[in-house]
Amino acid sequence: MKDLREIEFLLSEPLAGRRDFIPYEKAREELPAWKAWEQCQENGAWSYREKPEANLSQPDRRDVTAFRRFADLAGHVLDVGCGPGQRPGYVGAEVDLVGIDPLEPADPDFFYLKAICEYLPFKDGGFDAVVFGTSYDHVLDPEWSLRECRRVLKPGGRLLLWEGQHTKPRKEFDLPVPEGAEDPFHIKKYSVPEILDQFERNGIRVVAHADVRFTERADYVHHFVEAEVPA
C-alpha cells in the first residue's frame, strides 16, 4: 500500500499514521441518511465479493475503456468511490491518483484514504480533476458533495462523471433494501437532468455530455459528463 506521507501536502489535517478520515460521530449527527447508507455499503461489499465482473478495475471492458478515453485524466486526480479493488481501469498508470472509499482495497497501487465525499480531508485547490466512476449515486448528500468537490479542485479544474442507467425495470439482487433507500445499493438514483441541475446550482459548468450504448446491453445507457469549475 502506498505511503500517504507522499501526499501529506494535499491533506487538510495531520496524517498521524491513519488512513480512516471519516468523522463518524459528526456524520451520524449531520446526515439523516447515514444509517440507511451504512446498510447500502454492506450490500455493496457483498456485490464486490460475489460479482467481481462488475468491478471497474477491469481495464478491458468496453464501457471502462470508453470512459477512460472520454475522461482523459491527467495530473493529481481524486477518485470519489474508487472501490475496494485495484486502480480503476479508467485511470491510467501515469496519473497521480488518490482514491477515497468507505470500502478498503487490499493493496492498492494508488494513494487510498477511507473517506466520504461530504467530508473531504483535503486542502482547497489541490486537484486537477475529480472523478465519479459510477459512484455519484452512492453519496449521502449530492449537493454537499459537489460543494466539497469544487472546493478541492484547482481553478479551472475538471469534474468527470460516469452514470449508468437501465432503460427498463430490472430485478435487483436478493438483498435487503434499507429503510429510506431506493434499492439495496442506493439512497436515491438521480436522473441525468437532476444531476446536471445539481452541477449548475453549485457553480460547476458542464462542457461535454455523451450517451453511450453497447449492442450487448441495449437496455443500459452510459452517461459521460465533463464539467469544470471557474478559473
Image (cartoon, rainbow, N blue to C red):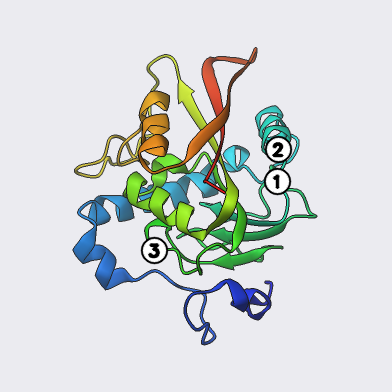
The secondary element bearing badge 1 is classed as loop
* Residue 68: assigned label: 2
Residue 175 percent coordinates (x, y): 34, 40
Q: Residue at x 42, y 30 (%)?
A: 196
Q: Quadrant of residue 226?
A: top right
Residue 148 percent coordinates (x, y): 42, 56
The secondary element bearing badge 3 is classed as helix
Callout 3 amino acid: Tyr
Q: Is residue 131 above or below residue 126?
A: above
Q: Residue at x 26, y 56 (%)?
A: 34
Q: Residue at x 44, y 63 (%)?
A: 120
CA gap, disc 2 and disc 3 = 26 Å
Mark 2 or mark 3: whose residue is earlier in sequence: 2
Residue 168 in view in this figure:
yes
Mark 1 or mark 3: whose residue is earlier in sequence: 1
CA gap, disc 1 and disc 2 = 8 Å
Q: Which residue is mark 1?
A: 73
Q: Which residue is mark 3?
A: 119
Q: Do tag 1 and tag 2 residues touch (Cβ < 8 Å)? A: yes
The secondary element bearing badge 2 is classed as helix
Q: Residue at x 37, y 31 (%)?
A: 197
